[in-house]
Image (tube, rainbow, N blue to C red):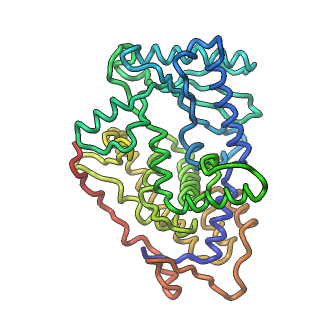
């Protein structure tokens, strides 16, 4: 990678992530909410108690990449899944499963005095709390699908590493939604979270051990397993948070075409190579972000790392404007962050990024950034593969691949 980042820019990116972070209480609030629903589903009078309901958080709350809403009018979206573990696809239709769980969620809403009605989405039920809570919970009904997923992947000689946590989900736009069939939409949020954790590598393990040591020093009895991913802030998580806000701001007037978070998170995780600082991780990820995008001559392919048969970019074929929007965003992100990384004054960094990150956020970051190095010192950080201080002005992404690779053995 050709590029250099100043120490001041590193400090600024760290401050930017702190400004994007949500309070720990928000994570705790989300955890309390889905556990409360789980307790409801296990109560004596529950119609699904004997089906062994298992509710768990997924998405950005599980990965630790949630960012603050851009305004007080926006809500936190807490994504959950609820698996009825004693059911299988031969027992009922997707519609039956969704209605079964929906009935219990509506009873839970009534029991908690929640005023807003339960809303049915394409794949989930949305439970909306009070305006003061500023968050809602989307619950995806599902059943275990480990055996079916393993057989499906083995038949095509594909990786089955994460098959044990696969689930089958409901989708009311599927043709077989009302029919008892083996043909259900597939997902694997737990497997994806494990893959994501593996991409954080030793950096994640070391930082989690550090948190554990600090907790024990304070007299808290805990094990490594007790520390949730969101408490271990790695450069990969931080870089994704920055990129998501940049995306949100750039596509504020075009929410339909904006790159989806699962694509940004997956490509960033593929590109991450255990960089130790946020700025270096951010620039390196942007430089390599296209490497996991394939093209078979007809369509773009971004494989789900837990299910090689799923293409995260499947909508790009039907909506080529979304592919164009992604590459436009990537080009803009490279320009913006490479420009900011060369600077030594926080206010100038804010000026460069304000239009793409939001003026309030960038000003907050510049106000709270760590103190710069002594006056007159450029403080350039040289990492493996990064240009010398003398070439700092020529930061570029010229070596980034422009043609997605051909998939190997993809059917």
Q: Quadrant of residue 135?
A: top right
In the displayed structure image, the side of residue 76 where residue 297 appears, left or right = left
Q: Which part of the image, by quadrant, shows the C terminus? A: top left
| Image point (49%, 40%), residue name | 190
Q: Quadrant of residue 363?
A: bottom right
Work out whether 373 lies above or below 321.
below
| Image point (62%, 65%), residue name | 13
Residue 387's x, y, as percent?
47, 81
For the residue pair 172 and 52, the one nearer the viewer reads as 52
Work out whether 266 lies above or below 207.
above
| Image point (66%, 87%), residue name | 377
For the residue pair 350 and 302, the one nearer the viewer reads as 302
State whether residue 258 appears in this view.
no
In the displayed structure image, the side of residue 43 where residue 254 appears, left or right = left
Residue 271's x, y, as percent?
43, 60
Residue 321's x, y, as percent?
38, 45
For the residue pair 293 and 105, the one nearer the viewer reads as 105
């Amino acid at each position: 990678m050709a590029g250099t980042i100043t120490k001041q820019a590193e400090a600024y990116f760290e401050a930017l992530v702190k400004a994007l972070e949500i309070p720990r209480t928000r994570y705790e609030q989300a955890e309390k909410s889905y556990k409360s629903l789980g307790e409801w589903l296990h109560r004596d009078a529950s119609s699904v108690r004997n089906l062994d309901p298992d509710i768990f958080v997924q998405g950005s709350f599980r990965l630790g990449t949630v960012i603050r809403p851009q305004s007080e009018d926006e809500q936190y979206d807490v994504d959950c899944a609820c698996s009825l573990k004693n059911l299988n696809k031969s027992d009922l239709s997707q519609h039956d499963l969704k209605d079964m769980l929906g009935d219990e969620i509506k009873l839970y809403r009534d029991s908690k005095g929640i005023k807003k009605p339960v809303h049915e989405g394409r794949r989930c039920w949305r439970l909306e709390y009070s305006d003061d809570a500023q968050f809602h919970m989307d619950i995806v009904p599902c059943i275990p699908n480990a055996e079916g997923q393993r057989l499906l992947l083995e038949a095509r000689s594909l990786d089955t590493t994460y098959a044990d946590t696969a689930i089958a989900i409901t989708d009311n736009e599927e043709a077989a939604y009302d029919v008892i069939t083996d043909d259900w939409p597939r997902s694997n949020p737990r497997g994806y979270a494990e893959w994501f954790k593996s991409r954080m590598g030793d950096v994640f393990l070391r930082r989690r051990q550090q948190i554990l040591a600090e907790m024990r020093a304070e007299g808290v009895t805990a094990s490594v397993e007790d520390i949730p991913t969101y408490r271990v802030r790695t450069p990969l998580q931080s870089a994704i948070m920055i990129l998501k806000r940049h995306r949100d701001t750039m596509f504020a007037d075009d929410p339909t075409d904006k790159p989806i978070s699962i694509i940004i998170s997956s490509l960033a995780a593929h590109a991450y190579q255990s960089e130790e600082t946020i700025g270096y991780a951010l620039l390196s990820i942007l430089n390599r972000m296209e490497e996991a995008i394939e093209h078979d001559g007809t369509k773009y392919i971004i494989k789900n790392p837990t299910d090689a048969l799923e293409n995260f970019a499947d909508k790009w074929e039907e909506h080529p404007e979304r592919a164009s929007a992604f590459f436009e965003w990537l080009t803009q992100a490279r320009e913006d962050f490479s420009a900011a990384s060369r600077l030594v004054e926080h206010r100038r960094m804010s000026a460069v990024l304000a239009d793409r990150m939001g003026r309030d956020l960038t000003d907050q970051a510049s106000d709270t950034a760590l103190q710069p190095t002594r006056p007159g010192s450029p403080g350039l950080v040289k990492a493996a593969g990064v240009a010398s201080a003398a070439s700092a002005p020529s930061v570029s992404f010229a070596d980034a691949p422009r043609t997605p690779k051909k998939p190997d053995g993809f059917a």
